[in-house]
Amino acid sequence: MAVASTATPTVTDDKELLISGSEACAEALALADLDVVTAYPIRPYDTVMQAIAKKIANGQLVAEYIVAEGEHSQFEVVKHASTVGARVFCGSSGVGWMYAMECLTVTPPLRVPMVCMVGNRALDDPGAFGVEHNDALVVRDLGWMLIWVDTAQEMLDTTLLAYRIAEDRRVLLPLAMSADGAFLTHSQTLVQVPTRAKVDRFLPRYDRGELLLHPDNPITVAPQANEDWVIEIRRQNDEAMKRAVGVIEEAYADFRKVFGRGPENPWFEEYMTEDADVILLGMGTISLPMKVGIRNMRAQGRKVGLVRPRWFRPFPTERLTAVLSKAQAIGVVDRDYSFGSPFFSGVVANEIRAAMYNADRRPPLLSFICGLGGREVTLEDVYKATDMCYAAAKSGKAEPRTHWLGVRE
Amino acid sequence: MAHFTCEVVYRGIFQKNLAARICRGIVFSARKAGRWGIAFGRYGDSPQRNGIPAKDFAIVADSQEELEQNMARYEPKEVDVTICLDDTLAKGVESWAWYGLQPINRVTVANGTLVVTSLRTADSLLRDIHKKSDPYHLAIIPAKASFSGLWVYREDHTEARVLGALARIKPEFLSLDAVSEAIKEQEWGSDLKVQSARKAHERLAVRPVRVTEGNDETPYAFEMPKWWEMREGVSIPAIPVGKPMEGGGGYVPERNPYFKKFTTRTMRPVIDFDKCVKCTLCWIQCPDSCFDVTPDGLYDANMESCCGCGVCEAVCPAKDCITMVNEAAFDDNQSQWEMWRRDKTAYAEWMTQKISDRAHTVRSHGFRFRGQYEKELVADRDVGGIEITDGIPGENAPRKARETEAASSIVTGVPEAPGA
């Protein structure tokens, strides 16, 4: 057979590896032919920087690997590399991500499609390295696309999708993939790794067009601009985020065509919601105890379902409210806190409340704060939340507005 | 029910604190009659830049509600009185923001008053001040541009004199007694300053300006792009490489056609092309790339780009080749090199006249020798706020008689300046 096959590679071309979420991310980065990566260690993100270093050391990836002297420089370096046309990767966790805050704010207006992994970690103090979602959530209003990942397989797939979406000329916005510390970053599962040929069919080269910083295209980036320009610049960012909605749908549809897997609905996973009286909602690896709990409760005749949002920015308002409106009660489980917020609830709960405000039907919504600092979310927690949701469904009142689950009291 | 709105147009840094004192003084004076007021600046002007045209405002009203009704947080749409603290600003204002060139009297209401601190005549100022579609009044407080800013505050009584003048223009809002009382209460106030205010009140010359009077020039303006017309990524294309001036010789850089910023200028270089040694230093050192390279290898300062910083004069090694001259001495932005090329004799005459111009070679801001500040300060104290017209020792020109007052319809009532 001297003639190269032009047939579409099948799923069987994939290789199966037993790897962590962080290693799955690194596999995808090698497949995406990453150009520049910067690193500065902090748990649990450091697992991905180690995995990338290993790939480069093994000759599986040719990329600039720059160890910065802190997170601020780490994010600055890739920001600049991206403006000259490099496909970049970066990441951090907890207070490391916060230390890069100034750079995180300037990245979206400069339309830099930086892809990052945030290994979700509690913010100091106390110095804890278990999962909380507050770190990634701090950029929710700034023009970052935010996605929460559940499994190592989803991590690999999402990393490929992330470049496709962020680098799309209609979008050009940074994208942070949140991975729950320990539960996703440090646990290894079987992952199907696609071939480079498939990835090449899915992921075009990064082209910044007229925004490329290059001697042949001399431009000034980030001049000072005051009240006569700023609102127009913000409006441009707003439009890019709006355009991202269509680009995300397109990318997931293409992903399914090329790789033969991936969700029909990019925005959130639905589990047994079809006939559910109570819908629980939570982001990230919290889905595991919820799914198991739901199966157990279904066996006892309780109709409970789960919605696990992937995309937090852009937020899938209409699609999400269409599903949630059908329930008798909604329980939003936040692995974050928002002290002093409406009803002292979690960030996600209040976003859902806001999204539901214009819905035709608004079932009672309870907010649960749970699993902070990496505490295990138990089946008992899930049952308790469900019981409270059923009570709210029966009374028609969203009481209590907020409840802390699994806290010693 | 009544209210009064006033703007103070000043030069950034050099007059920042002076403008603030005047606006605060207006509010304090009006308060004497129980009125309410606000004093604020146009924040986007970025008045922490040397010489940048900037604006402060004072609004006073009979009641708090009426004040709110007429209050602006950014810039009032119209003002009863415009106060211009540097007569080189009579040519117009281009702020740090992109508005194009704004005539100094742009927001002055019909039949309102433009007050200028200047040693020039009304006719001379009206060569610079743009025509207005409504009649208004021009009042002159005889003084050179005060240097009372962020780093140095010359106590030349300008704030007191302006407040005194306002008491004359708007007595129903600021009575002379109220102004006097308010001045005295300020941390900068004194009996001598009250006297200065009263003198200014007494001597202020006000002259009506007809719609036919003023500078004919159409101030440059432009449409700001829509958000979807702007390049994304907070990026702007680099200014293209320039082109030869003529016949393949020389070099003219491309310049921003919208944001010109030359109204920042209080002085401009006058060049004696016959003394130029073609060393390139002015061209290289100019922070605004304002020099055009002429086909014969000379350097022509382009007046649509020159900010008047004086670096060229400082670095020029050829004696008397570049001389900074007060901006008020010029009526246009024409190329000096073109004038020189056309008629060298006429140019020599023009140039000699400009650099010998005693009335104008006095720098409006900055110092030319050590001890100048102390010297001028003493002079101010001695005369109690009367303007200094004596020029500065060390200037490069012999004294020239002041512009004749006869040509003007203005009657200043001010005694001849000391030594005039």
Image: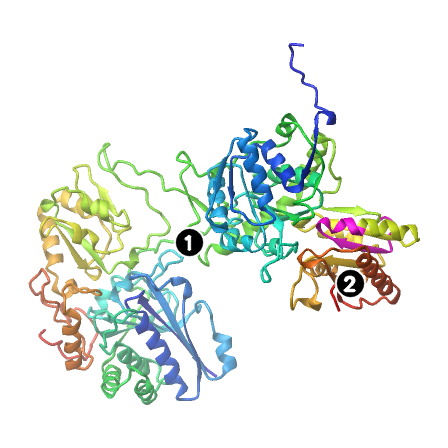
x, y percentage for residue B178?
34, 88
Q: Report helix, strand or loop for mark 2.
A: strand
- Residue shown at the point (63%, 38%) measured from the top left: A23
Most extreme residue toward the left, as rendered? B398
Please determine whether, in this image, residue A191 is positioned above or below residue B236: above
x, y percentage for residue A409?
75, 69
x, y percentage for residue B170?
35, 81
Where is the C terminus of chain B found, in terms of image quarters?
bottom left
Which corner quadrant of the image does residue B380 belong to? bottom left
x, y percentage for residue B301?
22, 48
Magenta residue span:
A274-290
For disc 2, the neighbor class at 10 Å (few under 14, some 14 to 19, many from 20) is many
- Residue shown at the point (68%, 45%) measured from the top left: A184
Residue at the spot of label 2: A366
Label annotation for residue A224: 1
For disc 1, the neighbor class at 10 Å (few under 14, some 14 to 19, many from 20) is few
Label 1 amino acid? Answer: Gln
On the picture, is B271 further left or further right than B172? left
First along the sequence among labels 1 and 2: 1
Please determine whether, in this image, residue B126 is positioned above or below residue B161: above
Label 2 amino acid? Answer: Leu
Q: Of B107 and B297, which appears nearest the observer?
A: B297
Q: Of B29 and A345, which appears nearest the observer?
A: A345
On the picture, is B203 further left or further right than A298? left
On the picture, is B358 further left or further right than A350? left
Q: Of B34 and A45, which appears nearest the observer?
A: A45
